[in-house]
Image: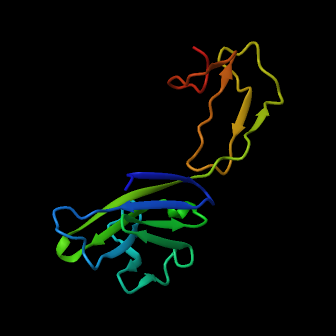
Amino acid sequence: MNDNLEVYLGDPAEIPCQYSFTGVDEEPSRVMIQWFVRAAGNGLRMRIFYSDVSQQIIDNNTDYSGRIEVTSDQRGTTLLIQNVQLSDEKEFFCQVNGLAAGNAERKTHLRVFAPPEAPVIEAVPTGISVTNTMPSKVASCEARNGFPKPNITWYRNDEPLVPTAGRKYYPL
């Protein structure tokens, strides 16, 4: 499994879980696969899927009921989450149990991004003081609805303005 997977808000997320059984004479006849989810920093995990030779169960009454599919083959399993939401930024665990052949689990941290709306730049309508010794505010910029919070960089003559202690975005 990948440590991190990054997707955009509203897109599907495919989280692969590849496995193999080493040190055994033959592949186990029964393999149980479970998928769990845990909010980052929270110790509690919630199962969202279970499968074995005879059944596949998407757990009811979770945030993922009706939004996930799980596909499997001899080399692994893939969790597909439809219409990813900001609240889906969590850790997803794949647990594989081959009974006597052994078991293991790994996790992927799903990171969700939302591009911001176009920035809104507003100039100060009163003009700039030529007698004031301190720099004057000339404009403000706001970028809405981005996740995580967008960074705003101001430029002057194609050079980025660097913030300094006690001041905001003034050229050096």
Q: Is residue 89 left or right of residue 120?
A: left
Q: How is the image coloured?
A: rainbow
Name the residue: 71% across, 34% down: 140
Above/below status of 91 relative to 55: above
Residue farthest to the front, as pictured: 25
> Residue 37 or 149: which is nearer the viewer?
37
- Residue 118, by quadrant, is top right
Above/below status of 59 relative to 10: below
Above/below status of 112 relative to 88: above
Q: Percent from the top left, x then y, of residue 85?
A: 58, 63
Which image quadrant: the C terminus? Answer: top right
Which image quadrant: the N terminus? Answer: bottom left
Figure disc tally = 0
Name the residue: 61% across, 59% down: 11
Residue farthest to the bottom, as pictured: 54
Q: Percent from the top left, x then y, of residue 64?
A: 51, 74
Q: Is residue 77 left or right of residue 121?
A: left
Q: Percent from the top left, x then y, of residue 56?
A: 43, 82
Above/below status of 161 relative to 69: above
Q: Percent from the top left, x then y, of residue 24?
A: 17, 67
Name the residue: 28% across, 62% down: 20
> Residue 70 or 86: which is nearer the viewer?
70
Name the residue: 68% across, 17% down: 158
> Residue 170 or 21: which is nearer the viewer?
21
Q: Is residue 5 left or right of residue 106?
A: right
> Residue 45 or 1: which is nearer the viewer?
1
- Residue 37, by quadrant, is bottom left
